[in-house]
Protein backbone atom coordinates (compact mmCIF):
# COMPACT_ATOMS: atom_id res chain seq x y z
CA UNK A 1 0.00 0.00 0.00
CA UNK A 2 1.07 3.59 -0.56
CA UNK A 3 0.35 6.80 1.28
CA UNK A 4 -1.89 8.92 -0.90
CA UNK A 5 -2.20 12.62 -1.66
CA UNK A 6 -5.95 12.26 -2.22
CA UNK A 7 -7.17 14.67 0.43
CA UNK A 8 -10.39 12.91 1.40
CA UNK A 9 -8.75 9.52 2.00
CA UNK A 10 -8.18 9.89 5.74
CA UNK A 11 -7.12 7.52 8.47
CA UNK A 12 -9.60 7.40 11.38
CA UNK A 13 -7.27 9.70 13.35
CA UNK A 14 -7.46 12.35 10.60
CA UNK A 15 -4.01 11.79 9.10
CA UNK A 16 -3.50 11.00 5.43
CA UNK A 17 -4.59 7.54 4.32
CA UNK A 18 -3.48 4.92 1.81
CA UNK A 19 -4.25 3.47 -1.60
CA UNK A 20 -4.29 -0.27 -2.24
CA UNK A 21 -4.36 -1.71 -5.75
CA UNK A 22 -4.96 -5.48 -5.92
CA UNK A 23 -6.76 -4.66 -9.20
CA UNK A 24 -5.48 -2.28 -11.85
CA UNK A 25 -6.94 -1.28 -15.19
CA UNK A 26 -10.41 -0.30 -16.24
CA UNK A 27 -12.72 -0.35 -19.27
CA UNK A 28 -14.96 2.59 -18.26
CA UNK A 29 -13.24 4.77 -20.89
CA UNK A 30 -13.26 8.15 -19.10
CA UNK A 31 -11.39 10.76 -21.16
CA UNK A 32 -9.95 12.51 -18.09
CA UNK A 33 -8.62 9.32 -16.42
CA UNK A 34 -5.29 9.86 -14.67
CA UNK A 35 -4.84 6.13 -14.03
CA UNK A 36 -4.86 5.28 -17.74
CA UNK A 37 -2.19 7.93 -18.40
CA UNK A 38 0.03 6.43 -15.70
CA UNK A 39 -0.58 2.89 -16.97
CA UNK A 40 0.50 3.87 -20.46
CA UNK A 41 3.44 5.85 -19.09
CA UNK A 42 5.89 5.00 -16.33
CA UNK A 43 3.87 2.00 -15.07
CA UNK A 44 3.54 0.31 -18.46
CA UNK A 45 6.43 -2.21 -18.10
CA UNK A 46 5.21 -3.23 -14.63
CA UNK A 47 1.62 -3.75 -15.75
CA UNK A 48 2.49 -5.65 -18.92
CA UNK A 49 4.61 -8.04 -16.87
CA UNK A 50 1.47 -9.26 -15.06
CA UNK A 51 -0.29 -11.94 -17.17
CA UNK A 52 -3.30 -12.21 -14.83
CA UNK A 53 -5.70 -10.38 -17.17
CA UNK A 54 -9.50 -10.38 -16.87
CA UNK A 55 -11.57 -12.58 -19.13
CA UNK A 56 -14.89 -11.55 -20.63
CA UNK A 57 -17.83 -13.89 -21.11
CA UNK A 58 -20.16 -14.83 -23.93
CA UNK A 59 -22.96 -16.54 -22.06
CA UNK A 60 -21.20 -18.96 -19.70
CA UNK A 61 -18.09 -19.28 -21.87
CA UNK A 62 -14.95 -17.30 -20.95
CA UNK A 63 -13.38 -15.37 -23.81
CA UNK A 64 -9.88 -13.91 -23.69
CA UNK A 65 -9.49 -10.76 -25.78
CA UNK A 66 -6.34 -11.04 -27.86
CA UNK A 67 -5.47 -7.36 -27.38
CA UNK A 68 -5.72 -7.51 -23.57
CA UNK A 69 -2.19 -8.79 -22.96
CA UNK A 70 -0.77 -5.81 -24.88
CA UNK A 71 -2.94 -3.20 -23.15
CA UNK A 72 -1.39 -2.07 -19.85
CA UNK A 73 -4.71 -0.63 -18.69
CA UNK A 74 -6.74 -3.78 -19.27
CA UNK A 75 -8.00 -5.11 -15.89
CA UNK A 76 -5.37 -7.15 -14.06
CA UNK A 77 -5.39 -8.92 -10.70
CA UNK A 78 -2.39 -8.71 -8.35
CA UNK A 79 -2.69 -11.67 -5.98
CA UNK A 80 0.46 -10.75 -4.06
CA UNK A 81 -1.19 -7.47 -2.99
CA UNK A 82 -4.43 -9.00 -1.77
CA UNK A 83 -3.53 -9.41 1.90
CA UNK A 84 -1.54 -6.19 2.37
CA UNK A 85 -4.12 -4.50 4.68
CA UNK A 86 -3.64 -7.29 7.25
CA UNK A 87 0.01 -6.24 7.65
CA UNK A 88 -1.12 -2.90 9.14
CA UNK A 89 -2.33 -3.40 12.68
CA UNK A 90 -3.12 0.26 13.42
CA UNK A 91 -6.43 1.49 11.89
CA UNK A 92 -5.94 3.01 8.45
CA UNK A 93 -8.13 4.68 5.88
CA UNK A 94 -7.70 2.77 2.62
CA UNK A 95 -8.89 3.53 -0.92
CA UNK A 96 -8.97 0.20 -2.82
CA UNK A 97 -8.35 0.22 -6.55
CA UNK A 98 -7.81 3.90 -7.22
CA UNK A 99 -6.01 2.68 -10.39
CA UNK A 100 -9.13 0.81 -11.44
CA UNK A 101 -12.85 0.66 -10.60
CA UNK A 102 -13.73 -2.08 -8.15
CA UNK A 103 -17.23 -2.31 -9.61
CA UNK A 104 -16.33 -1.26 -13.14
CA UNK A 105 -16.77 -2.63 -16.64
CA UNK A 106 -14.72 -5.74 -17.25
CA UNK A 107 -13.94 -6.43 -13.58
CA UNK A 108 -14.84 -10.06 -12.73
CA UNK A 109 -17.28 -10.26 -9.82
CA UNK A 110 -15.05 -12.82 -8.11
CA UNK A 111 -12.23 -10.25 -8.00
CA UNK A 112 -14.57 -7.72 -6.40
CA UNK A 113 -15.78 -10.30 -3.88
CA UNK A 114 -12.22 -11.11 -2.85
CA UNK A 115 -11.53 -7.44 -2.14
CA UNK A 116 -14.74 -7.09 -0.13
CA UNK A 117 -13.84 -10.17 1.91
CA UNK A 118 -10.55 -8.54 2.87
CA UNK A 119 -12.42 -5.35 3.81
CA UNK A 120 -14.68 -7.38 6.09
CA UNK A 121 -11.84 -9.36 7.65
CA UNK A 122 -9.79 -6.21 8.30
CA UNK A 123 -12.54 -4.65 10.37
CA UNK A 124 -10.17 -2.25 12.16
CA UNK A 125 -9.53 -0.35 8.90
CA UNK A 126 -11.83 2.04 7.04
CA UNK A 127 -12.24 1.39 3.31
CA UNK A 128 -13.37 3.99 0.77
CA UNK A 129 -15.12 2.32 -2.19
CA UNK A 130 -15.78 4.51 -5.23
CA UNK A 131 -17.27 3.62 -8.62
CA UNK A 132 -18.47 5.12 -11.87
CA UNK A 133 -20.76 2.11 -12.42
CA UNK A 134 -23.33 2.44 -9.61
CA UNK A 135 -25.73 -0.06 -11.19
CA UNK A 136 -23.34 -2.82 -10.08
CA UNK A 137 -23.39 -1.91 -6.38
CA UNK A 138 -26.65 -3.70 -5.61
CA UNK A 139 -24.99 -7.05 -6.37
CA UNK A 140 -22.72 -6.61 -3.33
CA UNK A 141 -25.07 -4.97 -0.84
CA UNK A 142 -25.10 -4.97 2.15
CA UNK A 143 -21.52 -3.76 2.47
CA UNK A 144 -19.23 -4.35 5.45
CA UNK A 145 -19.85 -1.72 8.14
CA UNK A 146 -16.29 -0.36 7.83
CA UNK A 147 -16.85 0.61 4.17
CA UNK A 148 -17.76 4.06 2.85
CA UNK A 149 -19.52 3.46 -0.50
CA UNK A 150 -19.53 6.21 -3.11
CA UNK A 151 -20.34 7.06 -6.71
CA UNK A 152 -18.55 9.49 -9.01
CA UNK A 153 -21.04 11.87 -10.66
CA UNK A 154 -19.60 14.39 -13.11
CA UNK A 155 -22.91 15.49 -14.67
CA UNK A 156 -26.65 15.61 -14.00
CA UNK A 157 -27.43 12.18 -15.44
CA UNK A 158 -24.74 10.49 -13.35
CA UNK A 159 -25.85 12.38 -10.23
CA UNK A 160 -29.47 11.30 -10.61
CA UNK A 161 -28.44 7.67 -11.13
CA UNK A 162 -26.15 7.84 -8.10
CA UNK A 163 -28.93 9.11 -5.82
CA UNK A 164 -31.32 6.38 -6.94
CA UNK A 165 -28.77 3.58 -6.53
CA UNK A 166 -27.39 4.78 -3.20
CA UNK A 167 -30.94 4.78 -1.83
CA UNK A 168 -31.21 1.08 -2.73
CA UNK A 169 -28.05 -0.22 -1.04
CA UNK A 170 -26.98 -0.74 2.57
CA UNK A 171 -23.77 0.94 3.73
CA UNK A 172 -22.73 2.76 6.89
CA UNK A 173 -21.69 5.86 4.90
CA UNK A 174 -22.89 6.61 1.36
CA UNK A 175 -21.33 9.45 -0.62
CA UNK A 176 -21.14 11.16 -3.99
CA UNK A 177 -17.93 12.48 -5.51
CA UNK A 178 -18.64 15.40 -7.85
CA UNK A 179 -15.10 15.23 -9.23
CA UNK A 180 -14.47 16.30 -11.84
CA UNK A 181 -17.51 18.56 -11.77
CA UNK A 182 -18.04 19.04 -15.51
CA UNK A 183 -21.44 20.75 -15.65
CA UNK A 184 -24.10 22.39 -13.55
CA UNK A 185 -25.89 19.82 -11.40
CA UNK A 186 -29.26 20.58 -9.86
CA UNK A 187 -29.82 19.01 -6.46
CA UNK A 188 -33.54 19.66 -6.23
CA UNK A 189 -35.88 16.84 -5.11
CA UNK A 190 -36.03 13.96 -5.78
CA UNK A 191 -32.24 14.14 -6.37
CA UNK A 192 -31.29 16.24 -3.34
CA UNK A 193 -28.98 14.97 -0.59
CA UNK A 194 -31.74 14.70 2.02
CA UNK A 195 -32.02 11.08 3.14
CA UNK A 196 -30.08 10.00 0.03
CA UNK A 197 -26.42 10.14 1.00
CA UNK A 198 -24.16 11.20 3.85
CA UNK A 199 -21.22 13.06 2.33
CA UNK A 200 -20.35 15.12 -0.76
CA UNK A 201 -16.91 15.58 -2.34
CA UNK A 202 -16.41 18.33 -4.93
CA UNK A 203 -13.37 18.75 -7.18
CA UNK A 204 -12.03 19.98 -10.49
CA UNK A 205 -10.68 18.22 -13.55
CA UNK A 206 -6.89 18.38 -13.65
CA UNK A 207 -4.35 17.75 -16.42
CA UNK A 208 -5.68 19.69 -18.26
CA UNK A 209 -7.10 21.93 -15.58
CA UNK A 210 -10.78 22.54 -16.27
CA UNK A 211 -12.38 24.10 -13.19
CA UNK A 212 -16.13 24.20 -12.67
CA UNK A 213 -17.97 27.50 -12.32
CA UNK A 214 -18.05 28.80 -8.79
CA UNK A 215 -21.86 28.93 -8.97
CA UNK A 216 -21.98 25.15 -9.60
CA UNK A 217 -19.88 24.51 -6.51
CA UNK A 218 -21.94 26.88 -4.38
CA UNK A 219 -25.22 25.21 -5.31
CA UNK A 220 -23.92 21.83 -4.17
CA UNK A 221 -22.48 23.21 -0.94
CA UNK A 222 -25.71 25.05 -0.13
CA UNK A 223 -27.67 21.84 -0.74
CA UNK A 224 -25.32 19.97 1.61
CA UNK A 225 -25.82 22.62 4.30
CA UNK A 226 -29.58 22.39 3.92
CA UNK A 227 -29.39 18.59 4.25
CA UNK A 228 -26.91 18.90 7.14
CA UNK A 229 -24.33 16.65 5.52
CA UNK A 230 -20.58 17.39 5.33
CA UNK A 231 -19.01 18.84 2.20
CA UNK A 232 -15.39 18.24 1.21
CA UNK A 233 -13.92 20.76 -1.25
CA UNK A 234 -10.70 19.52 -2.82
CA UNK A 235 -7.70 21.81 -2.97
CA UNK A 236 -7.83 21.88 -6.77
CA UNK A 237 -10.82 24.24 -6.41
CA UNK A 238 -8.73 26.91 -4.67
CA UNK A 239 -7.97 28.90 -7.89
CA UNK A 240 -11.70 29.66 -8.16
CA UNK A 241 -11.67 31.89 -5.11
CA UNK A 242 -10.12 35.37 -5.19
CA UNK A 243 -10.81 35.86 -1.49
CA UNK A 244 -12.20 33.82 1.41
CA UNK A 245 -15.96 33.71 1.21
CA UNK A 246 -18.75 31.62 2.65
CA UNK A 247 -19.78 28.88 2.26
CA UNK A 248 -16.51 27.56 0.83
CA UNK A 249 -14.05 28.10 3.66
CA UNK A 250 -14.11 26.70 7.16
CA UNK A 251 -14.55 29.12 10.02
CA UNK A 252 -11.09 30.30 11.13
CA UNK A 253 -9.96 29.83 14.68
CA UNK A 254 -7.03 31.33 16.54
CA UNK A 255 -3.73 30.75 14.69
CA UNK A 256 -5.62 28.78 12.00
CA UNK A 257 -4.46 28.94 8.40
CA UNK A 258 -6.96 29.61 5.65
CA UNK A 259 -8.41 26.34 4.36
CA UNK A 260 -11.28 25.17 2.23
CA UNK A 261 -14.08 23.29 3.90
CA UNK A 262 -12.95 19.71 4.04
CA UNK A 263 -15.51 18.03 6.27
CA UNK A 264 -15.57 14.31 6.95
CA UNK A 265 -18.70 12.29 7.76
CA UNK A 266 -19.37 11.09 11.26
CA UNK A 267 -19.27 7.32 11.46
CA UNK A 268 -22.49 5.95 12.91
Image (cartoon, rainbow, N blue to C red):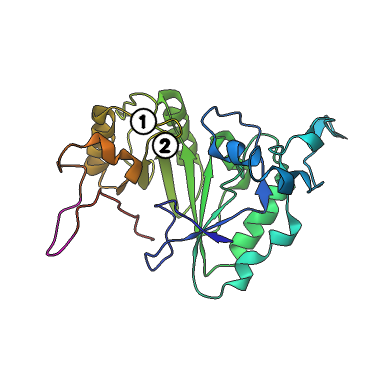
* Label number found at residue 191: 1
At x 44% / y 30%, what residue is drawn?
Answer: 208
**Residue 135 image position (x, y, % from top left):** 57, 34
Please say if 265 is above or below 208.
below
The residue at which mark 2 appears reads as: 179
* Direction left: furthest residue: 254
Question: How many dots with numbers?
Answer: 2
Left or right: 185 in relation to 121: left
Query: Mark 2, residues whose alpha carbon is within 10 Å: few (<14), some, or many (≥20)?
Result: many
* Direction bottom: furthest residue: 89
At x 61% / y 43%, what residue is drawn?
Answer: 100
Residue 247 in sight in this render: yes
* Label number found at residue 132: none
Rendered image quadrant of residue 190:
top left
Give the mark, 1 or 2, whose residue is nearer the N terminus.
2
Q: Which residues are magenta?
A: 250-256
Magenta-drawn stretch, dominant element (helix, strand or loop): loop
215, 268: nearer the viewer: 215
Amino acid sequence: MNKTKIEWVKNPDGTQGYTWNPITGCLNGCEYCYARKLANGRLKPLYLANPNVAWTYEGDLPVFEATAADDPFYPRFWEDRLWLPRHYRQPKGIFPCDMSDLFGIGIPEEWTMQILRICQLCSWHRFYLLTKQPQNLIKFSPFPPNCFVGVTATNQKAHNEAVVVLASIEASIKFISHEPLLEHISLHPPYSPEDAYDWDIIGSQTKPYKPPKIEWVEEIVRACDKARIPAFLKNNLMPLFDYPQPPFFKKPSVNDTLKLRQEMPKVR
